[in-house]
Image (cartoon, rainbow, N blue to C red):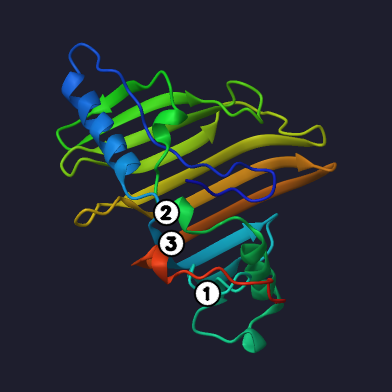
Amino acid sequence: MHIFSGFILSLMLVCFATAEAGNGATFTMLDRAAARAAELDPLSRYAFTLERRSRNNGAEAVTIRARFDPRWPKGEQWRLVDQDKEDASEETLIELKALRKSEENDEALVYDKLNEMLVDVELTQETSETATFIAPLNDDELPPDVLEVEVTLNKIEGYVSRIAVRSVREFKPVVIAKVKSLSQIQTYAAPVGDGPALLQSSENAASGKAMFKKFDQHSYSVYSDIERIDPAEIVESGEEQPL
């Protein structure tokens, strides 16, 4: 899954590993955790509440609390929680508009394609409760060898509980921009019943220079009140509605 703004990556991750001597059981457990996510119903959709606090270039932090529901009309699937648009600040309305224009939705809640993106996974640390893996992470739209991913496996409950992506050196995603540092740390709640592990929190940070101006961005998001939606309840609607 998934969630850097602007030119920064939107990542959806799942892990793949080949058993190594001495650690075969741990790698097998990781494989099973990835397989379980991949085998879940791909048509499942979710409604959820997002609370995000973000700060750009040292300005005052902006907090938004909004709910996403795929059953709502296109263009209105993100709505403010606990306040009307008429009472919201200009900064909050800008954040709401950005959510509605972005591709951020319920797809990011589930890590369902990890084994397509990770290779050369190495086990770096293990206890009786957790195991930590690390691997290079490449993307066709970025220079090679600029990102790595760290994955934490909860051995007790058999699921990936944490995924951390970070840059290992400065890089230029486009000619007019240079990223000095980049990181995304996502935590996941344990699966309930036959459901998947779902995104619980995401912390994103990026700094660098774009269009000859420095940028320093940081956000922390919490996902709650997640509701599994029957795809049959979703009716495709017409045109997007203005903010």
Q: Residue at x 41, y 35 (%)?
A: 114
* SS state under label 2: helix
Q: Are marks 1 and 3 in contact (CB under 8 Å)?
A: no
Q: Amino acid at mark 2?
A: Leu
Q: Nearer the viewer, residue 33 or 238?
A: 238
Question: Whole-Å distance between the Cαs marked 1 and 2?
Answer: 18 Å
Q: Residue at x 63, y 88 (%)?
A: 87
Q: Residue at x 84, y 43 (%)?
A: 211
Question: Whole-Å distance between the Cαs marked 1 and 3?
Answer: 21 Å
Sooner in the amino-acid sequence: mark 1 or mark 2: 1
Q: Amino acid at mark 3?
A: Val
Left or right: 211, with 56 as reference point: right
Query: Where residue 62 sits in the image (x, y, percent)?
Result: 61, 68
Q: Nearer the viewer, residue 166 or 242?
A: 242
Residue 109, label in figure? 2
Left or right: 134, with 128 as reference point: right
Q: Quadrant of residue 241?
A: bottom right
Q: Residue furthest top?
A: 21
Query: Where residue 239 sits in the image (x, y, percent)?
Result: 69, 71
Left or right: 148, with 74 as reference point: left
Label 3 Cα neighbours within 10 Å, binned few <14 / some 14-19 / many ≥20: some
Query: Where residue 185 sits in the image (x, y, percent)?
Result: 45, 45
Disc 1 target residue = 72
